[in-house]
Image (cartoon, grey):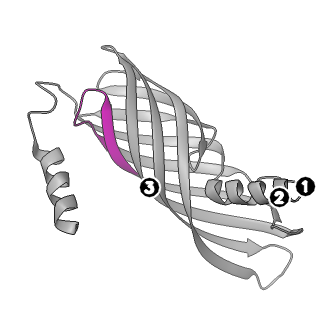
Amino acid sequence: MQKLILTIGLWVLFSNQMCHGQKYLHEFLVGYGPFARQQVLDDLVTNYFKSIFNRPLPRPVLSNSYAITYRYQPRRRIAIGATFNIATGGDYKSTRIETTGDYKYTSVVIAFETKFIYKQRSHLTLYGVTGLGGLLVREKDRRIPQGDLKTYGWPTCQVTPFGIRLGKQFAAFAEVGYGYKGILNAGLSTSF
């Protein structure tokens, strides 16, 4: 299985047949996203079971997200890539049973993404993005002077139904979605 994945990956990276003469197959993005929510999958499970048992839904803890993304476009309408994301935030933490403590946290996300291009013109691209990856969170309870540090991991995702990129080689972009990059993720990108 590993050999198959490696073979497909090398074929996608080094095949010149896929985008016939298209320039700018590689894209590098740096973005900022307010109101990020890394624990998206945890929210779905928690909210599902709380709604079944008529419990109040927890208030989500949101943060600021900083992301670096690389994408490769092997086909005219699809790009694949990876993102590295750091988020910081703090709020009251809601567990499955109760609200406990005033927490400050930092999280790191590494995820694989697929970009679906809806419309592409010379200086305008409309697209959507889906992403799935892993999350590592380090949180501290601010009420305890010694700092009760906890570290845990969790799967996470990003769903971005709408993104816009303005520019050709150097561009600005904005994406609207939900997940580890935030409700609105905006920044600069370059294609090469």
Marks 3,2: beta carbons within 8 A? no
Residue at 86 percent of width and 69 percent of height:
97
Q: Is residue 38 shown to the viewer in this render?
A: no
Tell me the element at label 1: loop
Along the line of sight, which residue is nearer the eye, 48 or 162? 48
**Amino acid tagged 2:** Lys
Queried whether the magenta region covers residue 72, the answer comes back as: yes
Marks 1,3: beta carbons within 8 A? no
Tell me the element at label 3: strand
Marks 2,1: beta carbons within 8 A? yes
* 6 left or right, relative to 117: left
User: Is tag 2's residue or tag 1's residue first in the polypeptide sequence?
Assistant: 2
Say few, some or many: other residues with alpha carbon within 10 Å of mark 1 (under 14 / 14 to 19 / 20 or more).
few
Compute the Cα span from label 2 to label 1: 7 Å
- Which residue is under mark 1? 56
Percent x, y of residue 8: 18, 53
Residue 50, labelled with which disc? 2
Q: Which residues are magenta?
A: 71-82
Say few, some or many: other residues with alpha carbon within 10 Å of mark 3 (under 14 / 14 to 19 / 20 or more).
many
Percent x, y of residue 46: 75, 60
Residue 111, labelled with which disc? 3
Q: In the picture shown, does residue 174 fall above or below 156?
A: above
